[in-house]
Amino acid sequence: MPPLQHVNIAVIGTGGVGSVFVSQLAWLAKTSTATKPSLCYIAMIDKALYNSNYSEIEIDTAIATLESKGTMPPSIPEIIEYLTGAPHRVILVDNTSAGNLAEAYPAFLKRGISIVTPNKKGFSGSYKLWEDIFNSAKAGGTLVFYESSVGAGMPIISTAKELVATGDEITRIEGIFSGTMSYLFNTFAPTSGSSGNWSQIVKKTKELGYTEPDPRDDLNGLDVARKMTILGRLAGLPIESPTAFPVQSLIPKELEGAINGHEFLQKLDQFDDQMKSHKIAAEKEGKVVRFVGSIDVASQKVKVGLEFFDSTHVMATLKGSDNIISFYTKRYGELPLTIRGAGAGGDVTAMGVTGDLLKVIAQLR
């Protein structure tokens, strides 16, 4: 029997995804016969828990202990120094959406710390940061996996990578990439049955926990734009940023200056006719409206926004908050490789993170 592999795990972010990931990590620690994951650092926004001698933190009670005994988190450079001194190979699991942490990925990777994350910011930020991340991983002999940055636990990133790595050529990518937008439009413009006003549906969607705390962070289209930036780069396009191509915002211009999400929702019903007009225009063509992202690799065109589809089209037949992504390639011809399933939620997103963790552990052996 090969010797037990020890790895040190550092977790930043214990919210919806982070808390589920910690429970999955606890399960992994109890069931794995080949690897011993040791939690040496865990932190939330304003608290951190770690021991100067790197003694193991009990995973089952880590979040409760963090909340009751955590201290002020160290700075990012201090975290890097601490993790560099750990007794075993270190994997940082970033379950946040923090831009400053994503910008520090190259510094972690250069110092021998591998990264697993659903955080889109590092991979959809500037193209220079994208290049720095992977160049730093190569220089540091480290790994970086980010499957859950697109499509939660669905194998979107790995599929795009494998298509390219095996010599195929991606010609086009299109799909519904936001669980929030999927739910909104499946409810607002169903293929059958009635629906309510746009503002009522947005409020209900927020109450169900399907939107960001401020729904404008979904409705501005930038979440989908970040995902398109990541996939476009994997397909070979040097996209500079998520603002380098057309992105249709569903925030009425009159409400762009709203003080906060609460004020935005209070006034949104005054502009229901704007969204209703899109729905009516689609219905006149015998179609439904959906919020879609698409990439045409040959023309290097990327766009995010509303499109009309026949009620029988795969884009129109999604349920709930499901996502669907289609890869058109030279190898697959006219019929795309399509992946469809739950594209949001703590359980499936954390599953993608845990799956990436297992991949890193396997490659570090």
Image (cartoon, helix red, strand yellow):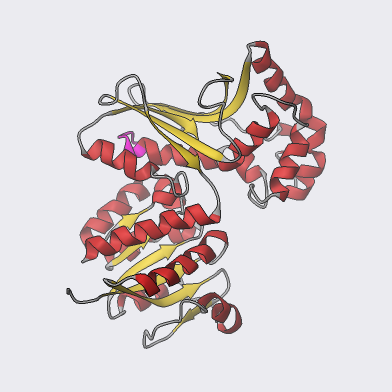
Instruction: Describe residue 303's horizontal placement relative to residue 321 as left or right.
Output: left
- Above or below, comparing residue 274 to residue 145 in the picture: above
134 falls in the magenta region: no
Q: Quadrant of the N terminus?
A: bottom left
Q: Residue at x 71, y 32 (%)?
A: 252
Q: Nearer the viewer, residue 162 or 233?
A: 162
Using the rendered image of the protein, determine whether residue 287 is visible from the camera's viewpoint: yes
Q: Which residues are magenta?
A: 233-242
Q: Residue at x 30, y 21 (%)?
A: 333
Residue 338 left/right relative to 89: right
Number of marks present in the image shown: 0
Is residue 140 in view? no
| Residue 249 position within the rendered picture, expressed as x and y whole percent measured from the top left | 62, 33
Q: Position of residue 297 (x, y in %)?
A: 34, 26
How far across and down, in percent of the image, does residue 305 sit?
56, 28
Q: Residue furthest bottom?
A: 53
Q: In percent of the image, x 25 and y 26: which residue is there?
A: 331
Along the line of sight, the residue nearer the viewer: 349 or 122: 349
Q: In the current view of this chain or complex, which residue is farthest to the left? A: 1
Q: Position of residue 336 (x, y in %)?
A: 36, 26
In this view, the residue in front, 53 or 301, is 53
Q: Quadrant of residue 68?
A: bottom right
4 displayed left or right of 207: left
